[in-house]
Amino acid sequence: MKIIAMIPARYEASRFPGKLMKDLNGKSVILRTYEAAKNTALFDEVYVVTDDDRIFSEITKHGGQAIKSKTEHECGSDRIAEAVQDMDVDIVVNVQGDEPFIDKDSLAKLLLVFREDDAASIDLASLKSPMLQSEEITNDNNVKVITNKNNFAMYFSRFPVPYPRNTDAKITYYKHIGIYAFRKQALTDFYNLPMLSLEAAEKIEAIRFLEYGKNIKMVETEMQTIGIDSPEDLEKAKKILKD
């Protein structure tokens, strides 16, 4: 299989504008994410896909590969779908531009699902990580995911799901880590399907796949990513790199 990584990168993030170009201990956030994806050596190619000249220049001037988006998009998956429509690829991995701490082992586990016994039933795969702290669980920047017994996603929400009405039930809450591995066809289908009400309400693009009946295989990982959604997150990331 030909496997590529695509990093969608929009400058005007609603919660923290310009975050991808912020300094993270000597390099921009987006450059650190690009280099981390390249350093895994899991991909035939790695690209940043952006509508912004500043981000495009930041990657290309450091010898990286960047693609300029032709149109405005509602979400990163739409931006990637436009970029890959004429490419000969099998699996497209969407790496979030604001998550520069990429774990190679977790990505390898994610890609492995496309070689396992139930691979034919998988349209895309993504990662989940257990959350242990209440402040993590209640933080609406952390998207929660619930799965069935075969680890296929049932729903994603910014609200803590499931609701613990029975306080004796032993529930593990899982954070959705926004790294996806798509079959190209699933990504193309996504691009051509309109947003429905659940995705619009939660502002979680993975929900569109569920609303249209696609199968999302979730892979558990212990990886704890730092998604840079606020200036406070950026300071945490700086401390991690320094330490």
Image: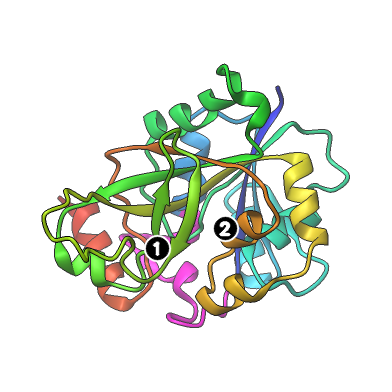
Residue 64 on image: x %, y %:
62, 47
Q: Which residue is mark 1?
A: 143
Residue name at image x 17 percent, y 51 percent: 169
- For the record, the magenta segment spans 11-31
Vertically, is 9 above or below 178? Answer: below
Residue 43 on image: x %, y %:
60, 31
Vertically, is 211 above or below 200? Answer: above
Q: Is 145 in front, or is 33?
A: 145
Examine the rendering and report whether any part of residue 35 can be seen. Answer: yes
Q: Which residue is mark 2?
A: 206
* Residue 81 colored in magenta in the image: no
User: What amino acid type is highlighted by mark number 1?
Assistant: Val
Q: Is 68 in front, or is 103?
A: 103
Mark 1 and mark 2 in contact (Cβ < 8 Å)? yes
Residue name at image x 34 percent, y 76 percent: 230
* Residue 30 colored in magenta in the image: yes
User: What amino acid type is highlighted by mark number 2?
Assistant: Ala
Residue 6 on image: x %, y %:
63, 48
Residue name at image x 50 percent, y 82 percent: 14
Is 1 left or right of 237, judged from the image as shown?
Answer: right
Judged from the image, the secondary structure of the residue bearing numbered disc 2 is: helix
